[in-house]
């Protein structure tokens, strides 16, 4: 079977590697106190951007220019990046999907806001579902509160759900439990916490509650840590 790995780069920055492709999600590295790597050291083939806030758009512009990676994002952010000289942009919108060399990327709703660094509108914020050929599905909720239509996303048979638990700007630990109940993933990984004091959380307590109140297996990572995905498949 195809080996895939998922590495937490801190906050909501992720590196998913599949079939030899490197897919970055929300590459906020410069200025990220929990960044596991320097932006200059990262290689990428694709960059997924969930919304325009600087703790998500992060180093996208610089990285796309240096690596030539294709950026997959909301139409408004795609247009904004094109204007800054980024050639390979794939603009999409909520409910849509694109088939890429590494698998299918679907754009999911997110309840949040999205302003770009220069104050222009980033359109709607989003999350992502990545589906690979072997049937593995990862859901990145990105910045959002819990919402009832997560119940529909459960039909996508999510293997790994990556959820924010930091509170204040996104759902907190309590709401994340509701999200897990709706999404029914096999494994749930928390993120978007502890980056700053304002979003500090107790993951030990969260883990205990996930085990008690949901069917999912919690997987708490430290920035830089990498896990094998879909290793029990096929
Ligand atoms: Ni945000
Ligand atoms: Mn954020």
Image: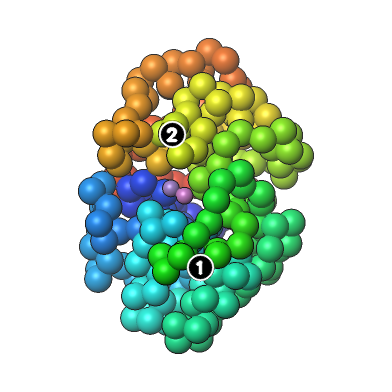
Helix, strand or loop status at disc 2: loop
Using a 10 Å C-alpha cutoff, classify the residue at mark 2 as few (fewer than 14 neighbours), some (14 to 19) or many (20 or more): few
Determine which quarter of the picture holds residue 179.
Answer: top right
Which part of the image, by quadrant, shows the N terminus?
A: bottom right
Please provide percent x and percent y for residue 38. 23, 62
Q: Residue at x 55, y 26 (%)?
A: 175
Query: How is the rendered protein coloured?
Result: rainbow
Left or right relative to 133: residue 115: left
Residue 120: mark in rendering = 1
Left or right relative to 231: residue 28: left
Determine which quarter of the picture holds residue 97.
Answer: bottom right
Q: Residue at x 68, y 29 (%)?
A: 182
Q: Is mark 2 within 8 Å of ligand 2?
A: no
For the residues labelled 1 and 2, the Cα–Cα distance comes to 23 Å
Q: Residue at x 27, y 52 (%)?
A: 32
Q: Do we see residue 176 in this rendering?
A: yes
Residue 168: mark in rendering = 2
Q: Nearer the viewer, residue 90 or 4?
A: 90
Judge whether 99 appears above or below 2 on screen: below
Q: Residue at x 34, y 23 (%)?
A: 202
Judge whether 178 appears above or below 170 on screen: above
Please provide percent x and percent y for residue 150. 69, 37
Q: Nearer the viewer, residue 13 or 147?
A: 147
Residue furthest to the top: 212
Helix, strand or loop status at disc 1: loop
Q: Are marks 1 and 2 in contact (CB under 8 Å)?
A: no
Using a 10 Å C-alpha cutoff, classify the residue at mark 1 as few (fewer than 14 neighbours), some (14 to 19) or many (20 or more): few
Residue 232: mark in rendering = none
């Amino acid at each position: 079977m195809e080996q895939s790995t998922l590495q937490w780069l801190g906050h909501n920055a992720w590196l998913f590697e599949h079939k030899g492709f490197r897919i970055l999600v929300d590459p906020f590295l410069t200025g990220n106190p929990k960044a596991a790597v320097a932006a200059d050291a990262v290689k990428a083939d694709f960059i997924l951007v969930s919304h325009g806030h600087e703790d998500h758009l992060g180093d996208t512009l610089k990285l796309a220019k240096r690596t030539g990676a294709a950026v997959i994002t909301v139409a408004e952010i795609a247009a904004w990046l094109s204007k800054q000289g980024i050639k390979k942009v794939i603009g999409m919108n909520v409910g849509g999907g694109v088939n890429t060399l590494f698998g299918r990327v679907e754009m999911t709703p997110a309840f949040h806001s999205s302003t770009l660094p220069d104050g222009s509108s980033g359109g709607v914020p989003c999350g992502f579902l990545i589906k690979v050929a072997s049937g593995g599905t990862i859901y990145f909720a990105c910045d959002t509160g819990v919402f009832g239509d997560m119940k529909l996303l459960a039909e996508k048979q999510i293997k790994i759900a990556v959820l924010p638990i930091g509170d204040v700007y996104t759902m907190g630990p309590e709401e994340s439990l509701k999200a897990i109940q709706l999404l029914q993933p096999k494994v749930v990984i928390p993120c978007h916490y502890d980056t700053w004091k304002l979003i500090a959380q107790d993951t030990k307590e969260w883990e205990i509650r996930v085990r008690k109140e949901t069917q999912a297996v919690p997987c708490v990572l430290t920035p830089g840590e990498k896990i094998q995905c879909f290793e029990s498949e096929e």
